[in-house]
Amino acid sequence: MVIFTTSGRLQALAVVLCLSACSEEVAMSGTEVAAANKAAVLRLFDEVLNGGQDHVLPELIAAEFVNTNNGIGGPAGMAAGAAFLRKTFETPRFVVEDAMAEGDRVAVRWKLFGRHVEPFRGAPPSGAAVVVPAMSMYRMAGGKIAESWVQSGPPQPHGGP
């Protein structure tokens, strides 16, 4: 499922794809760096969290990555976090509502939709369709996600996406 269809996001993704295909150094403006950083974070949501394509994590996550909320690190840590969410919320769907980038920071406001089937933050599974509102901040280094901070609310009942 593709949920990122705005032309600006597609242009930012094109910048990232071009950069990864180019073998020579390319000097980018601050605006281009921010757009490429934002595109990398949106790929995380689209390809990994929604698409289950964990094999792209080494392209997106720095080896020194750390999630400041739980201390998980590197691409393997991000894969474990994504697996936990897929197990906890049956058929999860991540919807990015806003994404902004400046310099080496990308901020994302998003929601997770799914059926709550495993314990989450001490709450027993409800079996109900829920939505979890959240915001994340990412620090980028060398075009990859190097650090993250996530703030999310509790699962709330939701009749469907």
Image (cartoon, rainbow, N blue to C red):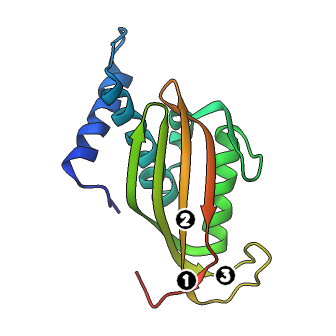
Q: Nearer the viewer, residue 132 or 101?
A: 101
Position of 22 relative to 60 (above/below): above
Q: Residues within 10 Å of mark 1 (few under 14, many from 20)?
A: many
According to the picture, the residue beneath numbered tag 2 turns out to be: 134
- What is the number of the mark on residue 117? 3
Q: Amino acid at mark 1?
A: Val
According to the picture, the residue beneath numbered tag 1 turns out to be: 130
Name the spot of residue 61 as percent of width and height, x first. 57, 36
- Count numbered badges in the picture: 3
Q: Amino acid at mark 2?
A: Ala
Label 2: element kind: strand
Position of 100 relative to 127 (above/below): above
Closer to the chain start, of discs 3 and 2, is 3
User: Which quadrant of the view contains residue 34?
Assistant: top left
Which residue, as the protein is rendered here, is positioned at the far top? 24
User: Which quadrant of the view contains residue 4?
Assistant: bottom left
Name the spot of residue 6 as percent of width and height, x first. 22, 53
Q: CA distance from mark 3 to mark 2?
A: 19 Å
Q: Amino acid at mark 3?
A: Val
Name the spot of residue 13 as percent of width and height, x first. 31, 39
Q: Residue at x 46, y 54 (%)?
A: 108
Name the spot of residue 31 as percent of width and height, x first. 31, 29
Position of 116 relative to 138 (above/below): below
Q: Residue at x 34, y 36 (%)?
A: 35
**Of marks 3 and 1, the one in the foreground:** 1
Position of 69 compared to 127: left or right? right
Q: Residue at x 50, y 40 (%)?
A: 56
Q: CA distance from mark 3 to mark 1?
A: 10 Å
Q: Residue at x 55, y 83 (%)?
A: 130
Q: Nearer the viewer, residue 29 or 96?
A: 29
Q: Residues within 10 Å of mark 2 (few under 14, many from 20)?
A: some
Label 3: element kind: loop
